[in-house]
Image: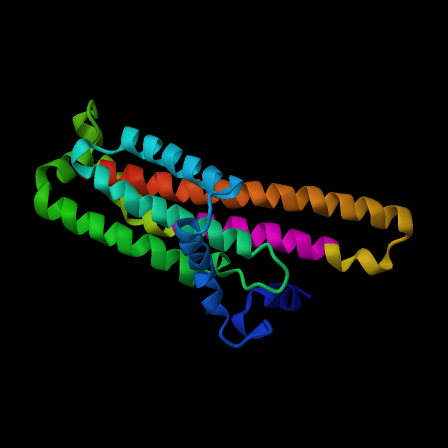
Amino acid sequence: MMTNLFSIFEPSSMIMSMNWISSLLGLLFVPYIFWASPSRWSLLWSKVIAALHKDFFALLLPSHLGVSIMFISLFSFIVFNNFLGLLPYVFTSSSHMVMTLSLSLPIWITLMFFGWLNHTNHMFAHLVPQGTPPMLMPFMVLIETISNVIRPGTLAIRLAANMIAGHLLLTLMGGVGPSLYSLTLFMLLMSQILLLTLESAVAIIQSYVFAVLSTLYTSEIS
């Protein structure tokens, strides 16, 4: 039962054999903004980008403001993949650790190299929070080191687990539909519509959390 349930996340179980190409489908929406006449959706997306710029500017130092473009692009890539995964017969690449870890790990490695090479004293100071008693300093260094090392893993697991949880719940609810009567089937359909709406909100929230946490990690290295 569980093997068949989780098989919906296997790339080989979908219709096409090259399902990872679905990760690039979101790029098809980018040129549309430049050559098509402005629509409500393009204006809404422009406002979203402006709001993200404002939030990231408040978190980053003045010398790192250009980095916000990268994190906005990262947010756009993740949110497009999350929404495409909600469509029928579209492969959900953001529910795989291969995809999420390939996004978080390069960012973390780049920040670590940049921080330790250019701001070594500041990185050492981050290992011991201000006001720590001398007796607790060795333990705080160990705790801060562990929390720093697991950052890419927590970013990747948070995004993948949230996308998997919603899809599994939708699959479980849809699997019992053929055995229900009309009234209970109608209630099931209403529940699935509400859950799909919740999943749409989760797709946006998890993309925003991933981008904001990456921005916070960037602001800590200097």
Where does the magenta region start and end? 155-173
Residue at 86% across, 47% down:
184
Of all residues, the one furthest to the bottom in this rendering is 17
What percent of the width, then of the height, locates residue 20? 46, 68
Q: Does residue 144 appear left or right of residue 32 in this picture?
A: left
Of all residues, the one furthest to the top in this rendering is 131
Q: How is the image coloured?
A: rainbow
Magenta includes 84?
no
Q: Main secondary structure of the magenta part?
A: helix
Mark yes or no: residue 10 visible.
yes
- Front in this rendered view, residue 205 or 98: 205
Mark yes or no: residue 139 visible.
no
Relative vertical location of residue 118 with respect to residue 19 in this rendering, above or below: above
Q: Looking at the rendering, in which quadrant would you find the N terminus?
A: bottom right
Magenta includes 169?
yes
Q: Looking at the rendering, in which quadrant would you find the C terminus?
A: top left
What percent of the width, then of the height, locates residue 85? 55, 57
Residue at 22% across, 41% down:
66
What percent of the width, then of the height, locates residue 87? 61, 57
Quarter-of-image position of residue 167:
bottom right
Q: Does residue 197 appear left or right of residue 184 in this picture?
A: left
Q: Does residue 127 appear left or right of residue 25 in this picture?
A: left
Quarter-of-image position of residue 8:
bottom right
- Front in this rendered view, residue 52 or 162: 52
- Front in this rendered view, residue 37 or 156: 37
What percent of the width, then of the height, locates residue 52? 37, 36
Residue at 89% across, 46% down:
183
Number of numbered labels in the structure image: 0
Quarter-of-image position of residue 148:
top left
